[in-house]
Image (cartoon, rainbow, N blue to C red):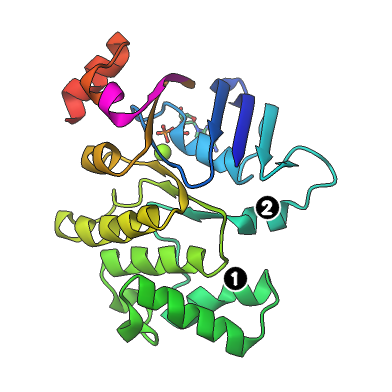
Amino acid sequence: MIEITDLHKAYGELEVLKGIDVCIKAGEVVSVIGPSGSGKSTFLRCINQLEEATSGRIVVNGQDLCARTTNINLVRAEIGMVFQSFNLFPHLSVLENVTLGPRKVRRMPVKTANEVARRVLEKVGLSGKINAFPSQLSGGQQQRVAIARSLALSPKAILFDEPTSALDPELVGEVLAVMRDLANEGMTMVVVTHEMSFAREVADRVIFMDGGHIVEDGPPKDVFRAPKSPRLKEFLRHVV
Ligand code: ADP
Ligand code: MG
Protein backbone atom coordinates (compact mmCIF):
# COMPACT_ATOMS: atom_id res chain seq x y z
CA MET A 1 0.00 0.00 0.00
CA ILE A 2 2.85 2.40 0.83
CA GLU A 3 6.09 1.86 -1.03
CA ILE A 4 9.04 4.10 -0.25
CA THR A 5 12.31 3.93 -2.13
CA ASP A 6 15.51 5.77 -1.27
CA LEU A 7 13.68 8.65 0.40
CA HIS A 8 15.87 11.64 1.22
CA LYS A 9 14.78 14.82 2.97
CA ALA A 10 16.93 17.81 3.82
CA TYR A 11 16.04 21.07 5.52
CA GLY A 12 18.60 23.38 3.93
CA GLU A 13 22.00 21.89 4.74
CA LEU A 14 20.58 19.49 7.31
CA GLU A 15 19.93 16.05 5.86
CA VAL A 16 17.26 14.46 8.05
CA LEU A 17 16.28 11.37 6.04
CA LYS A 18 19.25 9.67 4.44
CA GLY A 19 17.78 6.99 2.21
CA ILE A 20 14.70 5.29 3.64
CA ASP A 21 13.42 2.09 1.99
CA VAL A 22 10.26 0.56 3.31
CA CYS A 23 7.08 -1.14 2.16
CA ILE A 24 3.92 -1.19 4.21
CA LYS A 25 1.23 -3.68 3.30
CA ALA A 26 -2.51 -3.13 3.57
CA GLY A 27 -3.68 -4.00 7.06
CA GLU A 28 -0.22 -3.85 8.54
CA VAL A 29 0.44 -2.04 11.83
CA VAL A 30 3.96 -0.64 11.91
CA SER A 31 5.45 1.07 14.95
CA VAL A 32 8.30 3.49 14.45
CA ILE A 33 10.62 3.97 17.40
CA GLY A 34 13.87 5.84 17.80
CA PRO A 35 15.56 8.71 19.61
CA SER A 36 14.35 12.29 19.38
CA GLY A 37 15.64 13.99 16.25
CA SER A 38 16.11 10.73 14.33
CA GLY A 39 13.63 11.79 11.61
CA LYS A 40 10.47 9.92 12.65
CA SER A 41 8.09 12.87 12.28
CA THR A 42 9.72 13.96 9.02
CA PHE A 43 9.24 10.44 7.69
CA LEU A 44 5.49 10.52 8.47
CA ARG A 45 5.17 14.05 7.09
CA CYS A 46 6.76 12.98 3.81
CA ILE A 47 4.34 10.06 3.48
CA ASN A 48 1.30 12.34 3.45
CA GLN A 49 3.07 15.20 1.72
CA LEU A 50 3.09 17.71 4.56
CA GLU A 51 6.76 17.85 3.55
CA GLU A 52 8.11 17.47 0.07
CA ALA A 53 10.82 14.83 -0.23
CA THR A 54 14.18 16.02 -1.52
CA SER A 55 14.54 12.84 -3.57
CA GLY A 56 13.25 9.30 -3.70
CA ARG A 57 9.95 7.70 -4.55
CA ILE A 58 6.77 7.38 -2.53
CA VAL A 59 3.99 5.32 -4.03
CA VAL A 60 0.68 5.14 -2.20
CA ASN A 61 -1.94 2.76 -3.56
CA GLY A 62 -0.14 2.67 -6.88
CA GLN A 63 -0.01 6.46 -7.15
CA ASP A 64 3.41 8.07 -7.37
CA LEU A 65 3.25 11.08 -5.05
CA CYS A 66 6.04 12.82 -6.90
CA ALA A 67 4.29 12.59 -10.27
CA ARG A 68 2.93 15.95 -11.46
CA THR A 69 -0.40 14.39 -12.38
CA THR A 70 -1.10 13.16 -8.84
CA ASN A 71 -3.70 15.16 -6.91
CA ILE A 72 -1.97 15.60 -3.56
CA ASN A 73 -5.12 16.69 -1.75
CA LEU A 74 -6.90 13.49 -2.67
CA VAL A 75 -3.92 11.37 -1.66
CA ARG A 76 -3.79 13.23 1.66
CA ALA A 77 -7.46 12.51 2.29
CA GLU A 78 -6.71 8.81 1.81
CA ILE A 79 -4.03 8.89 4.50
CA GLY A 80 -5.16 10.21 7.87
CA MET A 81 -2.75 11.85 10.26
CA VAL A 82 -3.08 12.12 14.03
CA PHE A 83 -0.72 14.49 15.82
CA GLN A 84 0.65 14.65 19.34
CA SER A 85 -1.12 17.98 19.89
CA PHE A 86 -4.59 16.88 18.59
CA ASN A 87 -4.88 19.95 16.29
CA LEU A 88 -8.66 20.29 16.65
CA PHE A 89 -10.30 23.59 15.69
CA PRO A 90 -11.07 25.23 19.06
CA HIS A 91 -13.98 27.31 17.77
CA LEU A 92 -15.80 24.31 16.26
CA SER A 93 -17.85 21.71 18.09
CA VAL A 94 -16.86 18.07 18.10
CA LEU A 95 -19.43 17.38 15.37
CA GLU A 96 -18.18 20.29 13.25
CA ASN A 97 -14.55 19.23 13.67
CA VAL A 98 -15.42 15.78 12.37
CA THR A 99 -17.73 16.86 9.51
CA LEU A 100 -15.45 19.59 8.14
CA GLY A 101 -13.19 17.23 6.15
CA PRO A 102 -15.99 15.15 4.61
CA ARG A 103 -17.85 18.31 3.62
CA LYS A 104 -14.88 20.20 2.19
CA VAL A 105 -12.70 17.41 0.80
CA ARG A 106 -15.35 14.86 -0.14
CA ARG A 107 -18.09 17.44 -0.82
CA MET A 108 -20.49 15.37 1.24
CA PRO A 109 -23.93 16.86 1.96
CA VAL A 110 -24.36 18.02 5.58
CA LYS A 111 -26.83 15.27 6.42
CA THR A 112 -24.54 12.49 5.20
CA ALA A 113 -21.51 14.08 6.87
CA ASN A 114 -23.42 14.23 10.16
CA GLU A 115 -24.34 10.55 9.86
CA VAL A 116 -20.73 9.61 9.19
CA ALA A 117 -19.59 11.75 12.13
CA ARG A 118 -22.07 10.09 14.50
CA ARG A 119 -20.86 6.67 13.42
CA VAL A 120 -17.13 7.41 13.88
CA LEU A 121 -17.71 9.26 17.17
CA GLU A 122 -19.58 6.25 18.47
CA LYS A 123 -16.65 4.11 17.45
CA VAL A 124 -14.26 6.15 19.61
CA GLY A 125 -16.75 6.22 22.50
CA LEU A 126 -17.73 9.88 22.26
CA SER A 127 -21.37 9.82 21.16
CA GLY A 128 -22.23 11.88 24.23
CA LYS A 129 -19.85 14.72 23.33
CA ILE A 130 -21.10 15.65 19.88
CA ASN A 131 -21.97 19.24 20.82
CA ALA A 132 -19.03 19.87 23.16
CA PHE A 133 -16.13 22.13 22.25
CA PRO A 134 -12.53 20.90 22.43
CA SER A 135 -11.78 23.01 25.53
CA GLN A 136 -14.52 21.13 27.41
CA LEU A 137 -12.85 17.77 26.76
CA SER A 138 -9.94 15.97 28.39
CA GLY A 139 -6.80 15.41 26.33
CA GLY A 140 -7.74 11.77 25.84
CA GLN A 141 -11.19 12.74 24.56
CA GLN A 142 -9.70 15.38 22.24
CA GLN A 143 -7.32 12.84 20.78
CA ARG A 144 -10.20 10.42 20.24
CA VAL A 145 -12.05 13.20 18.37
CA ALA A 146 -8.92 13.66 16.25
CA ILE A 147 -8.95 9.94 15.44
CA ALA A 148 -12.68 10.13 14.60
CA ARG A 149 -11.96 13.09 12.33
CA SER A 150 -9.43 10.97 10.41
CA LEU A 151 -11.82 8.03 10.22
CA ALA A 152 -14.59 10.23 8.81
CA LEU A 153 -12.63 10.49 5.55
CA SER A 154 -12.50 6.67 5.24
CA PRO A 155 -8.72 6.68 4.97
CA LYS A 156 -6.76 3.77 3.52
CA ALA A 157 -4.17 4.26 6.24
CA ILE A 158 -3.64 6.42 9.32
CA LEU A 159 -0.31 7.85 10.44
CA PHE A 160 0.04 8.59 14.16
CA ASP A 161 2.81 10.87 15.42
CA GLU A 162 3.26 10.23 19.15
CA PRO A 163 -0.51 10.29 19.72
CA THR A 164 -0.25 9.79 23.48
CA SER A 165 2.85 11.84 24.30
CA ALA A 166 0.92 14.97 25.32
CA LEU A 167 -1.51 13.10 27.57
CA ASP A 168 -1.59 12.70 31.31
CA PRO A 169 -0.64 9.10 32.09
CA GLU A 170 -4.15 8.12 33.18
CA LEU A 171 -5.57 9.15 29.77
CA VAL A 172 -3.11 7.20 27.60
CA GLY A 173 -5.01 3.92 27.92
CA GLU A 174 -8.28 5.14 26.38
CA VAL A 175 -6.48 6.38 23.26
CA LEU A 176 -4.41 3.22 22.92
CA ALA A 177 -7.61 1.16 23.28
CA VAL A 178 -9.17 2.96 20.30
CA MET A 179 -5.99 2.41 18.28
CA ARG A 180 -5.96 -1.25 19.26
CA ASP A 181 -9.56 -1.62 18.00
CA LEU A 182 -8.61 -0.03 14.68
CA ALA A 183 -5.64 -2.36 14.36
CA ASN A 184 -7.86 -5.37 15.04
CA GLU A 185 -10.29 -4.21 12.35
CA GLY A 186 -7.49 -4.26 9.81
CA MET A 187 -6.68 -0.56 9.49
CA THR A 188 -3.25 0.11 8.00
CA MET A 189 -1.37 2.12 10.61
CA VAL A 190 2.05 3.68 11.02
CA VAL A 191 2.54 4.71 14.63
CA VAL A 192 5.47 6.72 15.96
CA THR A 193 5.34 6.00 19.66
CA HIS A 194 7.20 5.80 22.93
CA GLU A 195 4.62 3.30 24.16
CA MET A 196 6.72 0.18 23.92
CA SER A 197 3.83 -1.95 25.18
CA PHE A 198 1.77 -0.88 22.16
CA ALA A 199 4.68 -1.57 19.82
CA ARG A 200 5.25 -4.95 21.42
CA GLU A 201 1.64 -6.11 21.63
CA VAL A 202 -0.17 -4.48 18.71
CA ALA A 203 2.38 -3.84 15.96
CA ASP A 204 3.07 -6.43 13.28
CA ARG A 205 6.39 -4.76 12.68
CA VAL A 206 8.70 -2.39 14.49
CA ILE A 207 11.02 0.01 12.68
CA PHE A 208 13.91 1.52 14.61
CA MET A 209 15.16 4.81 13.18
CA ASP A 210 18.36 6.53 14.13
CA GLY A 211 20.20 9.38 12.44
CA GLY A 212 17.90 9.46 9.42
CA HIS A 213 18.25 5.75 8.66
CA ILE A 214 16.13 2.70 9.32
CA VAL A 215 18.52 0.71 11.45
CA GLU A 216 16.27 -2.28 12.20
CA ASP A 217 12.95 -3.46 10.81
CA GLY A 218 11.29 -6.64 11.97
CA PRO A 219 8.62 -8.34 14.06
CA PRO A 220 8.41 -6.94 17.61
CA LYS A 221 9.72 -10.12 19.17
CA ASP A 222 12.95 -9.89 17.16
CA VAL A 223 13.42 -6.16 17.55
CA PHE A 224 12.77 -6.14 21.30
CA ARG A 225 14.21 -9.51 22.33
CA ALA A 226 17.10 -9.78 19.96
CA PRO A 227 18.22 -6.30 18.86
CA LYS A 228 21.13 -6.57 16.46
CA SER A 229 22.61 -3.10 16.45
CA PRO A 230 24.37 -1.55 19.46
CA ARG A 231 22.34 1.63 18.89
CA LEU A 232 19.02 -0.19 19.32
CA LYS A 233 20.34 -2.03 22.39
CA GLU A 234 21.33 1.29 23.89
CA PHE A 235 17.96 2.87 22.99
CA LEU A 236 16.00 0.01 24.56
CA ARG A 237 18.05 0.21 27.75
CA HIS A 238 16.68 3.72 28.23
CA VAL A 239 13.03 3.30 27.24
CA VAL A 240 11.96 -0.16 28.37
P1 ADP B 1 11.85 13.02 15.44
O1 ADP B 1 10.39 13.06 15.11
O2 ADP B 1 12.45 11.65 15.31
O3 ADP B 1 12.15 13.61 16.79
P2 ADP B 1 12.08 15.03 13.39
O4 ADP B 1 11.71 14.42 12.09
O5 ADP B 1 11.08 15.89 14.06
O6 ADP B 1 12.63 13.90 14.37
O7 ADP B 1 13.37 15.94 13.20
C1 ADP B 1 14.58 15.45 12.65
C2 ADP B 1 15.56 16.60 12.53
O8 ADP B 1 15.06 17.55 11.59
C3 ADP B 1 15.80 17.38 13.82
O9 ADP B 1 17.15 17.72 13.86
C4 ADP B 1 14.93 18.60 13.66
O10 ADP B 1 15.46 19.68 14.36
C5 ADP B 1 14.97 18.84 12.16
N1 ADP B 1 13.76 19.47 11.64
C6 ADP B 1 12.50 18.96 11.73
N2 ADP B 1 11.61 19.76 11.10
C7 ADP B 1 12.32 20.80 10.61
C8 ADP B 1 11.98 21.97 9.85
N3 ADP B 1 10.70 22.21 9.48
N4 ADP B 1 12.97 22.82 9.53
C9 ADP B 1 14.25 22.56 9.88
N5 ADP B 1 14.64 21.49 10.58
C10 ADP B 1 13.70 20.62 10.95
MG1 MG C 1 8.76 13.66 16.20
Secondary structure beneath disc 2? helix
Q: Within the magenta stretch, is there residue 144? A: no
Q: Which residues are magenta?
A: 214-223
What residue do we see at 32% from left, 61% from top? 178
- The label on residue 75 is 2
Relative to 79, is 129 above or below? below
Q: Is residue 154 above or below residue 52?
A: below
Residue 70, placed above or below residue 99: above
SS state under label 1: helix
Marking on residue 101: 1
Residue positioned 52% across, 34% down in the render: 43
User: In the image, which is nearer the foreground, mark 1 or mark 2?
Assistant: 2
Say whether disc 1 or disc 2 marks the residue closer to the N-terminus.
2
Above or below, 102 relative to 16: below
- Where residue 171 appears, x then y in whole percent? 20, 60
Query: Label 1 neighbourhood size at 10 Å, few (<14), some (14-19), many (20+)?
Result: some
Q: Residue type at mark 2?
A: Val
The quarter of the image holding the C terminus is top left
Image spot of residue 168 (x, y percent):
19, 56
**Residue 196, which numbered label?**
none
Residue 89 visible in the current orientation: yes
**Figure quarter occupied by ligand 2:** top left
Task: Estimate the spatial distance between the alpha carbons at disc 1 and disc 2, rounded to whole Å.
Answer: 13 Å
Q: Amino acid at mark 1?
A: Gly
Asked whether residue 92 appears in the rendered view, the answer is no
Residue at 43 percent of width and 49 percent of height: 160
Relative horizontal placement of residue 141, taking residue 79 as reference (left or right): left
